[in-house]
Image: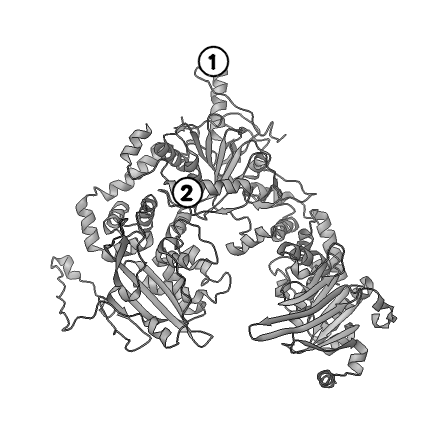
């Protein structure tokens, strides 16, 4: 696991850097001066109860929302400056080609009336792929990597089980080999056995491709399995962060302590 | 020399029109006058949908089309759009309306009082078959009240605003000739408020009832209570180039305001007004307006949905256009279909 | 018929029916449409003395372009004598004093529903196509406000997705008429429900094309020498209707778009461009010694059933 890598990891520049994010919705403060960094190949877990700001933060990473103030950079070629300053078109292209996302609710991430392979193909089409044969082939590769049964590739997601739907979302997210993969409660709501299988797939993908991931979950078990580093959020603030093992075994903040104890 | 025998061309369309008009017979001023006098409610409905207040022309349009409402409205609209715009009337305030009927279902009594006015609401709907036996029906004379109701009535919403029951929206101070005009600009969404109200005023009564009724039955998100319904006459005030303000006449108008409980602890309002007296239309329209604010995209109570689909000229025109030949498009589809049967499905 | 007689008889009506304010708006929108090829321009769309859906959009554009020297041709499904074409043509000449013609070569303005004539249009001709539904994104997004944003974003992924799934399901593209096309590399437009046969005629054409939807209140244009590329996969060629080899049973002409006429056994075919058929018959009669054939058939887009 990456957590085993030597500390030299910290000398490589982070892929994702967010600084001083603030966001209010009316009277509600969703994010209160939140900063985050994710290093290449690393899995960052974000944990917190609902309303802690973890999902808002993930939406910001996917440029679905803009903070009142704050800075967001990805260390990618041709992307200098604050990503929140990008125009609508550039944002859309960036999200489509460099960032993949898997939502808790597959209805949010998938076109339910279209085929599963079509959902993957749409990503490739947005990125400019115009060969039908290539769309089929690349779609197959992505679905296979998500351990989706290929004989069902032209079924509509609505006809599939929850676990399979998540695999279609995952295939869609990784089809363009994004620099950053965002996972928003990807296994919440699935049966425990299915959940384990999906997590297995995610781990295998991570190992094979060294994809940089950010995973948001309220489930400590998921983060214990997946994350190298963990950020604990509460009331829109980061209350504790550190290596996953360290945070789970020796929580410093009393909120984290209560979370870990509740889990035990 | 017609190349294709199945098309009749100019002669056929000429004869088919004659056939239609022959059925209606001669139209003269007497027939138009009779229609205007005997069918005031129909005239009102046509004038509202045509957005042209001219009872004689509306009666003429009905005479010319034999009472086909969509054709009559189209006729009036096509005439209306060619007319020069001489002046723009001053806005009419609710308290300035000469009110014939004013009711509220929200309160037992309201400031200014409930005025029943002319209505069939509490009448028994019995056919006067005697008329067909040669015994004319003569309406019983109205007995005037001892004290006539005041012609001008305050707006109930104004009272509610003063009580803090409804939000007082910021009133935009727009000069009358700067008010957006739906007949001169395309309707885009989110719609300008003026466009929404104009579109509702011109909407098809039947279409509005269907969608409004769907909203009332539960496909909407707000259950309406009639806050205030009015049948009234409005003074058309215009300014002469010399600067004199004068009345160019009166027009019959109806308006409905419906209300429901909002999230913020205040009442939400929906509003609809139209030329002529047409209660079903304004209540339905106000209900749709009430529902529009919180409507999800694509729902029948969303503004874009109900405004596009209750436009009488567009809706009826598109419906009857399906009678036009479509054999080129059909041929093209057929070609694709035949090709598909033989094409191999790739793995 | 002179204009003077008309304007006297129809005092309240402006020349060409539409009043100057309506024409001014249309001219502005038409210029904008030319400036941004394929981009739908919303316009007020006045009521005209014809039902919506019956060519009122095309009519308004044509009325704005007409002058007394114009020569106007109107076709419906390729035919000049189709009832609605006849009705529109007579209205146009009545309110403008323009001359009527059936001959594509003689026309200065051609208003059409569902077809582009087979003879090549020239730089001095304008084609006005009637459009029932101007929105190529309607099948994937019925909400017009969202569709407008998608055009602004050049967000055509879901449109492509439809084509992808047709390939998956049927092994070929199943679009019939109104095949979506990318104009000038930027906006996807619906070329109106013309058959696929006609779409390539718009590509780098010499003439100006207006497409106008009166009911939906949108107009757009393909200026001369503008790229019009049907959406196709790089490895699945664009397929026009398989009509190149069919022969018209009336005129004997081969190589153009045909109407299929079902028979007790099988079908026969006739030219969809009806006046091309008339000219071909007259010319063959002239060759046979029959008098009165001054007709000419101009260069056509398709030659021997294929687009060169």
The number of discs equals: 2
Question: Which residue is nearer to you in this view: B25 or A90?
Answer: A90
Dividing the picture into quarters, in which one does residue A213 lie?
bottom right
Question: Which residue is nearer to you in this view: C131 or C28?
Answer: C28
Q: From this viewpoint, is residue B45 visible? A: yes
Say few, some or many: other residues with alpha carbon within 10 Å of mark 1 (under 14 / 14 to 19 / 20 or more).
few
Query: Dot 1 corresponds to which residue?
Result: C289
Dividing the picture into quarters, in which one does residue A19 lie?
bottom right
Label whose residue precedes the other's in the sequence (1 or 2)? 2
Q: Which mark is residue C56?
A: 2
Answer left or right for B101 relative to A169.
left
On the image, the x and y values in percent for residue C46 come to 39, 45
On the image, the x and y values in percent for residue B82 come to 33, 43
On the image, the x and y values in percent for residue C158 come to 61, 53
**Residue at mark 1: chain:** C
Q: Secondary structure at mark 2?
A: helix
């Amino acid at each position: 696991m990456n957590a085993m890598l030597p500390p030299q990891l910290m000398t490589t520049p982070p892929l994702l850097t967010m600084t001083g994010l603030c966001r209010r919705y009316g009277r509600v403060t969703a994010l209160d001066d939140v900063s985050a960094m994710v290093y290449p190949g690393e899995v960052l877990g974000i944990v917190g109860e609902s309303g802690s700001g973890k999902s808002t933060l993930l939406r910001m990473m996917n440029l679905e929302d803009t903070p009142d103030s704050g800075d967001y950079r990805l260390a990618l070629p041709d992307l200098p400056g604050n990503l929140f300053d990008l125009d609508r078109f550039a944002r859309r292209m960036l999200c489509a080609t460099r960032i993949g996302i898997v939502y808790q609710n597959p209805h949010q991430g998938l076109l339910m009336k279209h085929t599963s392979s079509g959902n993957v193909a749409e990503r490739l089409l947005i990125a400019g792929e115009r060969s039908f044969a290539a769309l089929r082939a690349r779609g197959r590769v992505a679905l296979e990597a998500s351990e989706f049964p290929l004989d069902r590739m032209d079924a509509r997601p609505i006809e599939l089980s929850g676990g399979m739907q998540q695999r279609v979302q995952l295939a869609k997210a990784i089809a363009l080999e994004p620099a950053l993969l965002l996972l928003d409660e990807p296994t919440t709501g699935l049966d425990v056995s299915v959940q384990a299988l999906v997590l297995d797939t995610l781990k295998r993908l991570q190992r094979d491709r060294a994809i940089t991931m950010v995973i948001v979950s309220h489930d400590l078990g998921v983060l214990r399995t997946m994350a190298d580093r963990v950020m604990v959020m509460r009331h829109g603030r980061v209350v504790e962060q550190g290596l996953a093992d360290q945070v789970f075994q020796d929580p410093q903040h009393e909120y984290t302590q209560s979370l870990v104890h509740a889990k035990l | 020399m017609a190349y294709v025998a199945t098309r009749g061309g100019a002669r056929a369309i000429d004869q088919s029109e004659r056939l239609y008009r022959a059925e209606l017979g001669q139209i003269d001023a007497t027939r138009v006058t009779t229609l205007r006098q005997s069918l005031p409610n129909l005239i009102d409905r046509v004038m509202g949908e045509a957005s042209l207040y001219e009872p004689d022309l509306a009666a003429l349009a009905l005479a010319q089309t034999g009472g086909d409402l969509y054709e009559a409205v189209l006729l009036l609209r096509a005439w209306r759009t060619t007319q020069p715009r001489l002046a723009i009337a001053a806005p009419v305030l609710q308290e300035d309306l000469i009110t014939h009927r004013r009711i509220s279902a929200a309160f037992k009594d309201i400031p200014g009082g409930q005025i029943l006015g002319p209505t069939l609401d509490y009448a028994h709907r019995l056919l006067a078959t005697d008329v067909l036996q040669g015994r004319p029906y003569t309406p019983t004379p109205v007995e005037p009240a001892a004290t006539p109701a005041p012609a001008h009535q305050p707006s109930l919403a104004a009272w509610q605003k003063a009580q803090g029951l409804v939000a007082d929206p910021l009133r935009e101070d727009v000069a009358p000739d700067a008010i957006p005009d739906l007949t001169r600009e395309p309707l885009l969404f989110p719609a300008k408020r003026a466009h929404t109200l104009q579109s509702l005023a011109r909407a098809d009564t039947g279409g509005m009832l269907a969608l409004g009724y769907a909203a009332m039955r539960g496909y909407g998100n707000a259950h309406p209570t009639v806050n205030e319904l009015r049948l009234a006459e409005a003074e058309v005030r215009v300014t002469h180039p010399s600067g004199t303000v004068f009345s160019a006449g009166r027009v019959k108008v109806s308006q409905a305001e419906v209300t429901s409980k909002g999230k913020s602890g205040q009442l939400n309002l929906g509003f609809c007004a139209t030329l002529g007296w047409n209660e079903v239309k304004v209540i339905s329209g106000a209900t749709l307006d009430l529902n529009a604010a919180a409507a999800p995209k694509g729902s029948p109570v969303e503004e874009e949905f109900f405004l596009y689909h209750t436009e009488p000229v567009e809706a009826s025109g598109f419906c009857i256009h399906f009678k036009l030949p479509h054999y080129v498009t059909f041929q093209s589809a057929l070609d694709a279909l035949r090709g598909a049967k033989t094409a191999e499905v790739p793995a | 018929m002179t204009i003077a007689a008309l304007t006297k008889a129809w005092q309240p009506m402006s020349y060409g029916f539409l009043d100057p304010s309506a024409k001014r708006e249309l001219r502005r929108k038409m210029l904008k449409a030319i400036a941004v090829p394929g981009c739908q321009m919303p316009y007020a769309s006045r009521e005209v003395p014809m039902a919506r859906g019956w060519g009122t959009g095309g009519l308004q554009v044509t009325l704005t372009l007409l002058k007394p020297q114009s020569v106007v041709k109107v076709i419906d499904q390729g035919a000049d004598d189709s009832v609605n074409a006849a009705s529109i043509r007579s209205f146009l000449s009545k309110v403008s004093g323009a001359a009527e013609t059936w001959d594509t070569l003689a026309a200065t303005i051609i208003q059409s529903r569902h077809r582009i004539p087979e003879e090549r249009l020239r730089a001095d001709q304008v084609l006005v196509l009637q459009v029932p539904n101007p929105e190529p994104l309607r099948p994937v997004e019925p909400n017009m406000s969202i569709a407008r944003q998608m055009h602004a974003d050049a967000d055509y992924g879901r449109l492509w997705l439809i084509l992808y799934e047709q390939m998956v399901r049927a092994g070929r593209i199943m679009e019939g008429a109104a095949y979506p096309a990318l104009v000038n590399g930027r906006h996807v437009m619906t070329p109106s429900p013309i058959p696929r046969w006609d779409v390539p005629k718009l590509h780098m054409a010499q003439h100006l094309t207006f497409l106008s939807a009166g009911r939906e209140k949108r107009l757009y244009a393909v200026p001369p020498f503008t790229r019009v590329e049907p959406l196709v996969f790089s490895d699945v060629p664009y397929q026009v209707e398989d009509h190149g080899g069919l022969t018209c049973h009336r005129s004997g002409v081969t190589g153009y778009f045909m109407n299929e006429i079902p028979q007790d056994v099988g079908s026969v075919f006739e030219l969809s461009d009806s006046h091309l058929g008339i000219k071909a018959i007259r010319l063959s009669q002239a060759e046979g010694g029959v008098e009165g054939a001054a007709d000419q058939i101009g260069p056509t887009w398709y030659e021997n059933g294929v687009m060169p």
